[in-house]
Image: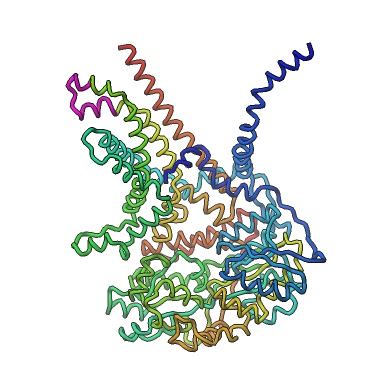
Amino acid sequence: MTSAHRKSYGVKGAPYAFLVPATVLFALFFALPIGYAIWLSLHKVQVNGLGLGSGARQEVWAGLENYTDALSDSEFLDGALRVLGYGAIVVPVMLGLALVLALMLDSDKVRLAPFTRLAIFLPYAVPGVVAALLWGFLYLPDVSPFYFVLEKLGLPQPDLLDGGGLYAALSNIAVWGGTGFNMIVIYTSLQAIPAEVYEAAKLDGATPLQIALRIKIPMVAPSLVLTFFFSIIATLQVFSEPTTLKPLTNSVSTTWSPLMKVYVDAFGKGDIHGAAAGAVVIALATLVVSFGFLRAANSRNKRNVSQGAAR
Amino acid sequence: MPNITKHRRFVATAVAVTLGATTLAACGGSDDDGEAQAGPAKLTYWTWTPGMDKVVDLWNKGPGKEQQITVTVKKQASGDTLVTKILTAHKAGKGPDLVQAEYQALPTLVSNDAVADIAKESGDAKGKFADGVWQQTTLGSDAVYAIPQDIGPMMFYYREDLFKKYGLTVPKTWDEFAETARKLKKEEPEVDLTTFSANDSGLFAGLAQQAGAKWWTTEGQKWKVGIDDAATRKVADFWGGLVKEGAIDNQPMYTPSWNKALNTGKQIAWVSAVWAPGTLTTAAPDTQGKWKMAPLPQWSDSENVTGSWGGSSTAVTTDSKHKGAAAKFAAWLNTDPRALTALAKEGGIYPAATTAQTSDAFVQPPAFFSNQSDFYTAAAEIAKTTAPSAWGPNVNVAYTIFKDAFGAAAKDKSDFGAALKTMHDDTVADMKKQGFEVSE
């Protein structure tokens, strides 16, 4: 009786024992830091008088003050708008290019496919900061070979580090670096489409263009959703490109993107409490936007499936 | 931008920055007094000065060996990021024993109770420094929070050959400086005298200091902020005017473009500090021997005063268990002739200690200025004319605001006075938000 009881207890406990390592790691390296960030965001530093000497500053409860400050900070909101503008260029251009390139590589007529694939993918292997530096040099009129050529040809020389040109310049870096990755994701799912589908389409008299539009694109839709999802997140968190270009121009402020503002608050102004609140806001916004998109995409998918079934 | 690890951590990436701060800041601050302990002491020293390990070797093999005080150098990044790192380490109670700190960062460090008062241990160090330099380490009190290491008296650098070519004379006053810029622009529209750069706040702070600005002062138990005072406004309007009329360039310094402009003679002067030869060596290598240094232009004929741009000190932290030993090392490092010579040779610094400025290490001019044999004699004379400075507890905040406000104003060629007002207002607002008493 007792031994049987012990045995069943041991079996019952086994799943929990297996869960322990993952739970501990999750708690230590994920839940705990996030919890601490939230704790920080709910506190602030209070200074007395001149604030010199020991005991002149203490950490006090701030409630939601840091959050109201972050949300009412015009720089933070302007940064969010700038990032939205940037994303409106990057995401469609990058994914459009990735899709077109993937379809082209997938067609029968392409030559040197492995080499081309690698060549398109290669910029992705260049670290973001290096890519931004590289392009930064090319954007600076005095040192850029492009501007040299434009000048020699007597063509207009756009200012890529100011105004609207800056968005194009920043987007270009992201598109250059990110297209290859997204192309590989789409291309891989194209390769997974069974050959019978194409055969059937050809027998029905579909042209290559029709095959691409009516068969390939709908069938890789899940990959498109995935790449879109990744791209939105990466866009909302843009940091290294504008940070790297910042020293080169007066047009990029230290708070150009929301994440840069968080960085400046924490490491420029030494206000980790305000920075924590900003980071939590960005995390929540990213969560809402990206999962909102994912849900919308999924529900549409389901609707299409059920409609198809009804027919 | 998009990379695999980022995708994987998609939910948490936004908080990553905070997490960085978090792990550093973990554990509440513990303040033990750490009175000088007897016996051998092992000290760690956070510094960004190149070659400091070699200077410290001299200590470890010499006086340090006798007194059983061993110092280990931990190389750091310079500037604001180190201040943040010191503060987070202090919060965790794990600060090093000694830190290198720029003068303007000292009030922030003192305000966070990160650096210790070493008035008792600093001995006769005070007499080795100019009053204006020493005063920066006391914050106007009886305490001593650091020993000065290097200073950055500001000077005017110009291309001697091109000044001759364009028929320009070295400006003695800022009015003459403006005239020189205009004259040059008229004759050579492609060439600029210099640029107004907003990416290093220390330059503007130094220029304001020369004009007599006092950005932070105390009145009893209240701070008084004077960023938007008459002196600073004069400086802001002067440079804003030159940028607006196009007499000088408005692009930032330290960019590949700027290097090229200096190297090819597209910019022919630079308002800088005593450390400029080092920067010019890398920025404009082809112009060696073509530059000359002169005193900074003055606001009136009768004046002879300069500001400072850069410079740092050695401070002992409140976390140190061996404050006495650490203070001894700090004093040796910055006053002992052997240490100072090594600092000049290995670290390329310009010493704060007055006797060291005319020591053997500073007989020869810097290699880049081989044409100006009296470079360091002139520099020592200029250093004596440094105006007192007045730093406050949130210089880092003011400096950040400066970069954005003046960067935008320079880009748009708009009113620098408005940018200055933003800098003043936001700095005061930040102090009030933190709870500092600020008098209006």
Residue A172, horizontal then vertical, whole percent: 33, 49
Which quadrant of the view contains residue B337?
A: bottom right
- Drawn side of residue B268 relative to residue A109, left or right: right
The part of the image, by quadrant, that contains residue A102 is top left
Seen from the viewer's position, the closer of residues A5 and B154 is: A5
What span is colored magenta in the figure? A201-216
The C terminus of chain B, quarter of image: bottom right
Give the residue displayed 39% in from the left and 77% down from the top.
B269
Q: Main secondary structure of the magenta part?
A: helix
Q: Is residue A135 above or below residue B332?
A: above
Nearer to the camera, A239 or B332? B332
Using the rendered image of the protein, determine whether residue B416 is visible from the camera's viewpoint: yes
The answer to whether residue B303 shows anywhere in this view is no
Q: Is residue A43 left or right of residue A102?
A: right
The color scheme shown is: rainbow
Is residue A3 shown above or below A261?
Answer: above
Seen at 31% across and 85% down, the residue is B165
Image height check: is B218 above or below A288? below
Extreme residue toward the right, this view: B38
How many numbered callouts?
Answer: 0
Q: Residue B332 colored magenta?
A: no
Q: Is A202 one of the magenta-colored residues?
A: yes
In this rendered view, identify the residue nearer to me: B232 or B327: B327
Left/right of residue B332 with respect to residue A307 in the rendered view: right
Please name the residue shown 59% across and 63% down the image.
B75
Q: Nearer the viewer, residue A121 or B89?
A: A121
Q: Residue at x 44, y 43 (%)?
A: B3
User: What x and y, as percent, mark residue B86?
Assistant: 63, 59
Residue A278 on image: x %, y % = 53, 45
Give the image location of residue B426, x and y in percent. 53, 58
